[in-house]
Image (cartoon, grey):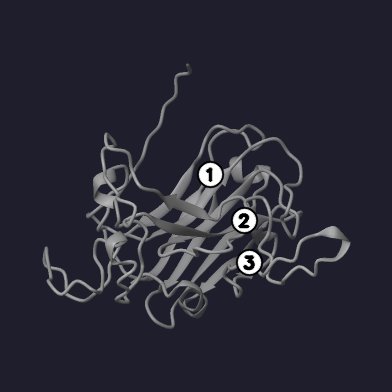
Amino acid sequence: SRNYVSGMVQGWNKFCFTGGIVEVDVIFPGKPNIGGLWPAIWILGNLGRATYEASTNRIWPWSYNTCNRDLQPAQELSACNVDGHYGLNAKQGRGSTEIDIVEAMMGPPGALKATEPPIANPYAAMTLQSAPGVTSRRPKEGHPPRFNATSGKDGYPVEPPQNWYRHLEYSGNTSINPYFYGTYLAPTKPKEPVQRSKKQAYQADAISAMFQLLPQHFEKKHKFRLEWQPGPGGRIDWYGQSPTASGDVEWVHAYSITDKDIDGTTGAVIPA
């Protein structure tokens, strides 16, 4: 066994907003080449409360406002619900979506496979976590999405294209994150603190990018910014400061997700 210390500073139900700009000034703790810490800055819809699992069960990270009878059992606040409870609107799908502004990942140096451009430790994950997720022909962890069918040549089997978001935008030293495509919220066991039946189980997607960090990010503060335009026609953009060879910093528009891409893939929307 090992001793560890963990902490969280949160503003749950103290400061709420539904779109805009969040900018943080960050110096990451620890060493860039030593894993173990997981420093992160993220926002979560206030219908759920971080670490209170009963508040997020079948709430996190739904961002879906369509009545779908097949999905209704898995989404606590479904657009199929004709009664408005707890002061919420009837026939309005709601949830507690998560937007990760920056999550730092440290570890031994060296390029990480399946990243383009090549990304090495340390890096920052920038992620929208959303439900419902892609349920069939998902990309395999550790591999980029394959958007074309395989030909069957050279002894390889013929396989159809994989399903994933096709219009994500990356800039600078930023790659798709092929190591985390989401979480399956499976049926629970009888003695678990929250319960989900087989019909209530669901797939959540992590639509994530990897932004290259450098040792300077662990030595002095750098800014990261999220620009969030909610609802239909909206988008989410991530920005980060990166040190230059001259000792200055430059802003990088690292990553973008559009409502059109989300809606066209799963029917979910940019959270509002």
* Spot occupied by residue 127 in the image (x, y as percentages of width and height): 51, 58
- Rendered view: 187 above or below 263: above
Q: Nearer the viewer, mark 3 or mark 2?
A: 3
The image quadrant of residue 95 is: bottom left
Q: CA distance from mark 1 to mark 2?
A: 22 Å
Q: Residues within 10 Å of mark 1 (few under 14, many from 20)?
A: some
Given the image, on which type of amino acid does mark 2 rest? Asn
Q: Is residue 70 left or right of residue 226?
A: left
Mark toward the start of the polypeptide (3 vs 2):
3
- Dot 2 corresponds to which residue? 177
The image's mark for residue 162 is 3
The residue that label 1 is drawn on is: 27
Of badges 3 and 1, nearer the viewer stands 3
Q: Determine which quarter of the picture holds residue 241.
A: bottom right
- Label whose residue precedes the other's in the sequence (1 or 2): 1
Of mark 3 and mark 1, the one earlier in the sequence is: 1
The reply to whether residue 219 is in sight is no
Q: Is residue 204 above or below residue 171?
A: above
- Dividing the image into 4 quarters, which one contains the C terminus? bottom left
Neighbour tally class for label 2: few under 14, some 14-19, many 20 plus, Cα within 10 Å: many
Amino acid type at circle 1 is: Ile
> 108 or 113: which is nearer to us?
113
Residue drawn at the location 66% of the way across and 63% of the way down: 145
Element at label 3: loop
Q: Dividing the picture into quarters, in which one does residue 168 lie?
A: bottom right
Q: Amino acid at mark 3?
A: Gln
Query: Could you tell me if the residues under marks 3 and 2 are in contact, i.e. CB atoms within 8 Å?
Result: no
